[in-house]
Image: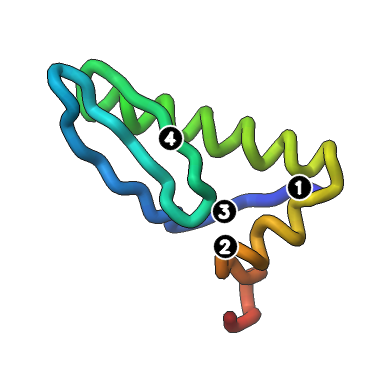
Amino acid sequence: MSVKLQAIPVVYFEEGSVIIAHCVPLDVSSCGHDLQEARRNISDAVAGFIETCEEMGTLEEILEGSAFAREGETT
C-alpha cells in the first residue's frame, strides 16, 4: 500500500540557532540550520516514519489515531 499524505501540519520554532520542525499529529520531529533545511528534513522524517509503519503493518492504526482520513472520507 502506497500512501500520499497531503497538508500535513508542521510547527516550526527556533531553538538557539536551529529551526525545529514538529509534525504534531504523528509526533515526528526534525531540524535544520534554516527553514528550507528544516522543511526538507521533516519531509524526509515523515516519509521514513510512514514507510516504517507500512513495513510493520501499523500504518492504518497510526493514521486513524492521528485523525488522518483517506481522500473522500471524513474524520
Residue 2: mark: 1
Q: Is residue 28 left or right of residue 34?
A: right
Q: CA distance from mark 1 to mark 2?
A: 18 Å
Q: Is residue 65 above or below residue 39?
A: below
Residue 17 at what x, y percent from top left?
14, 17
Check if mark 2's residue and mark 4's residue have beta carbons within 8 Å.
no
Q: Secondary structure at mark 4?
A: strand
Q: Quadrant of residue 70?
A: bottom right
Which label's residue is closer to the chain start, 2 or 4? 4
Residue 63: mark: none
Please, what is the three-letter code of the amino acid marked with disc 4? Ser
Q: Secondary structure at mark 3?
A: loop
Q: CA distance from mark 2 to mark 4?
A: 15 Å
Camera-side mark, 2 or 3: 2
Crowdedness of circle 1 by 10 Å Cα count: few (<14), some, many (20+)? Answer: few
Task: Return the residue nearer the eye: 52 or 36.
Answer: 52
Camera-side mark, 1 or 2: 2
Camera-side mark, 1 or 4: 4
Q: Residue at x 49, y 40 (%)?
A: 28
Which label's residue is closer to the chain start, 1 or 2? 1
Q: Which residue is mark 3?
A: 5
Q: Which residue is mark 2?
A: 66
Q: Which residue is mark 4?
A: 29
Check if mark 1's residue and mark 4's residue have beta carbons within 8 Å.
no
Q: Residue at x 62, y 70 (%)?
A: 69
Please, what is the three-letter code of the amino acid marked with disc 2? Ser
Q: Residue at x 63, y 65 (%)?
A: 65
